[in-house]
Image (cartoon, coloured by chain):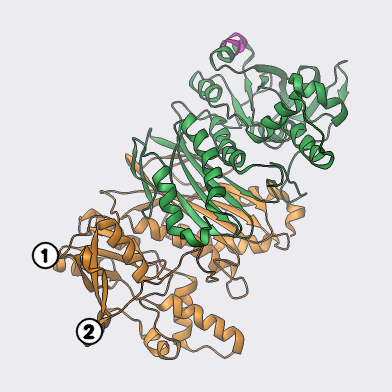
Chain colours: A green, B orange
């Protein structure tokens, strides 16, 4: 159905009807504000604004995947604080050519992920727009002290969850496949899935916070080196990264040769990058098993004056300019 | 300075530096998520997405006024629940032609209002965009049970704070003044201010909730009749509005003759529309004095089957189609 026929209030009613009432949602969608039960003495709040043409391209991104990703990137921020997500607010600017089936597909992807982590959609705003605009705000809590970007000390180990570079390589493939219309093999399918449907590392993040194992943490959204730079600045440290230790997926290894290496600077990994004391290595290994995600030690924190150094496999320091994404310095079209 | 030179992280740092650390803000701007102290056992959450060309027109809206208004419309939603605003998240999509002075002006208007109501800016997101996009999420609390749209009963009185129609008439004048470049008299200045810098009725809202005087409440954003319609649907009631009782400002009375009447359907009043038991009339009068805002009784709730009826000054029922704003049914350019 055309949205112009359904109308704004019809759309809101549709969304309201398909949103399960959360146990702790006292007033949900449809009033001036939502009222929700607080689950601790403090709240974690994060927000992301995704804009068509800048953050995603609907030529190669399905609306269902986009719904998943719009929520996932926010959940990843909560994970990076060691938090647990509770509530989400979703505001949409919707182009005139969208129909209610398009919106349904988006909400399906969004809600599937929300249900997986018991996050309740409690409100938002819907508007007409020239291009699709997605604004998400997630509210959560932490059962322990949230893990900040500051707090790492020289001598700490540096770890990352999962594998790096898959999403960035997936995006390159998407652009190439679109041009050449070649058939995709399994490695490509894997990388594309990593690009379209990132997994927020909520279990690992929450356990790292609860056990006070992470001294500083961030999620890798703008590229490993850039996000490591944020930890270094906030913690007033430098870092040495051993390139040979970077966790790379089989799919990435199979296809990265032709495409160049994105594991250091490719964005949208949504893995957790964190620092931890050397004496906690065994505990980190145990946590990796419990949280069911690979956790790889990739380097160490050093005094700030040494900056960020990447060692190549032979142990030689490779001159490395920090690369990554700055929204005002270059254009990107990614999802 | 050009934003392309300042960069995304320079901009975030600028915003962080000028944002005073709130007492209850444990982790503010600059980490993956903010961490804030909860001020009650539940939170109120509301969000608005404002898009250039659809919600505002920079040809006649200053960025400073826009900063004020973007926050005010969200605070008005908190007021309509009887709540107290605590924290705000602000995400911006910024056009390439903006420079850092433009952003400063926007933040100045935003922060002036935030300071007035002790609302702390704790986070958000900044991105490049073709047109200005403003996404605001406000989190607050209520010292009493929040006032919903449902809860009014037949026999209740209907009240509205302040005056109606000023903002809609102001918008008409803006469009006309722009065309004719005529000089503006005082009444026009007043109406324009009502359009550009709405006042969220937080004191009145919070006191109505605290004293349990409002049986249902909403803020008038889409036009009196449309927002009354929301209360009627949610409360399963009808309503009779006496046109002669509608509170009109001197400025409105001076200029509305030529411009047509907007008090019933003109949007963006951001006044509170609420229902209350007949026996509480004296208490409402006292509250009006304490909250320092006019509160006018404009009608009464009736059984649902009577619908919404407007009585003209002679007491005759005027056939009245509900008008107001639906974002998908027509275009609007307003702020």
Q: Residue B201 in the image: x percent, y percent? A: 35, 64
Label 2 or label 1, whichever comes before in sequence order:
1
Q: Is residue A49 left or right of residue B26?
A: right
Q: Is residue A147 magenta?
A: no
The dominant secondary structure in magenta is helix
Q: Tag on residue B168?
A: none
Determine the CA span between mark 2 and mark 1.
27 Å
Residue receiving disc 2: B316
Say which residue appears at 52% left-offset and 28% top-offset: A82
Say which residue appears at 56% left-offset and 86% top-offset: B177
Residue B157 visible here: yes
Q: Is residue B25 left or right of residue A297?
A: left
Residue receiving disc 1: B279
Q: Is residue B304 left or right of residue B31?
A: left
With respect to residue B132, does A238 lie above or below?
above
Q: Chain of mark 1?
A: B
Q: Nearer the viewer, residue B280 or A292?
A: A292
Q: Is residue B314 left or right of residue A46?
A: left
* Quadrant of res B108: bottom right
Q: Residue B90 in the image: x percent, y percent? A: 54, 52
Mark 2: secondary structure:
loop
Task: Read off the magenta span.
Answer: A281-286
């Amino acid at each position: 159905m055309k949205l112009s026929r359904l109308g704004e209030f019809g759309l809101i009613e549709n969304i309201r009807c398909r949103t399960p009432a959360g146990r702790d949602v006292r007033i949900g969608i449809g009033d001036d504000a939502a009222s929700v039960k607080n689950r601790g003495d403090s709240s974690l709040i994060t927000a992301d604004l995704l804009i068509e043409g800048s953050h995603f391209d609907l030529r190669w991104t399905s609306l269902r995947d986009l719904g998943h990703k719009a929520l996932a990137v926010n959940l990843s921020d909560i994970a990076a604080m060691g938090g647990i997500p509770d509530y989400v607010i979703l505001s949409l600017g919707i182009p005139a050519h969208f129909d209610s089936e398009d919106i349904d597909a988006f909400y399906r992807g969004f809600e599937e992920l929300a249900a997986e982590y018991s996050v309740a959609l409690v409100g938002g705003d819907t508007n007409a727009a020239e291009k699709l605009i997605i604004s998400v705000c997630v509210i959560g809590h932490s059962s322990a002290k949230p893990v900040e970007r500051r707090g790492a000390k020289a001598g700490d180990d540096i770890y990352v969850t999962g594998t790096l570079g898959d999403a960035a390589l997936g995006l390159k493939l998407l652009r190439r496949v679109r041009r050449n219309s070649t058939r995709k093999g399994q490695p490509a399918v894997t990388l594309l899935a990593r690009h379209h449907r990132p997994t927020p590392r909520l279990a690992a993040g929450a356990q790292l916070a609860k056990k006070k194992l992470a001294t500083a943490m961030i999620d890798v959204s703008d590229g490993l080196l850039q996000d490591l730079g944020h930890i270094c600045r906030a913690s007033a440290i430098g870092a040495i990264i051993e390139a040979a230790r970077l966790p790379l997926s089989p799919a990435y290894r199979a296809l990265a040769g032709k495409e160049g290496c994105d594991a250091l600077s490719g964005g949208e990994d949504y893995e957790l990058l964190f620092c931890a004391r050397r004496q906690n290595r065994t505990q980190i290994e145990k946590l990796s098993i419990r949280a069911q995600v690979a956790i790889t030690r990739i380097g160490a924190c050093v005094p700030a004056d040494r900056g960020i150094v990447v060692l190549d496999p032979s142990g030689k320091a490779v001159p490395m300019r920090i690369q990554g994404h700055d929204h005002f310095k270059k254009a990107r079209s990614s999802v």
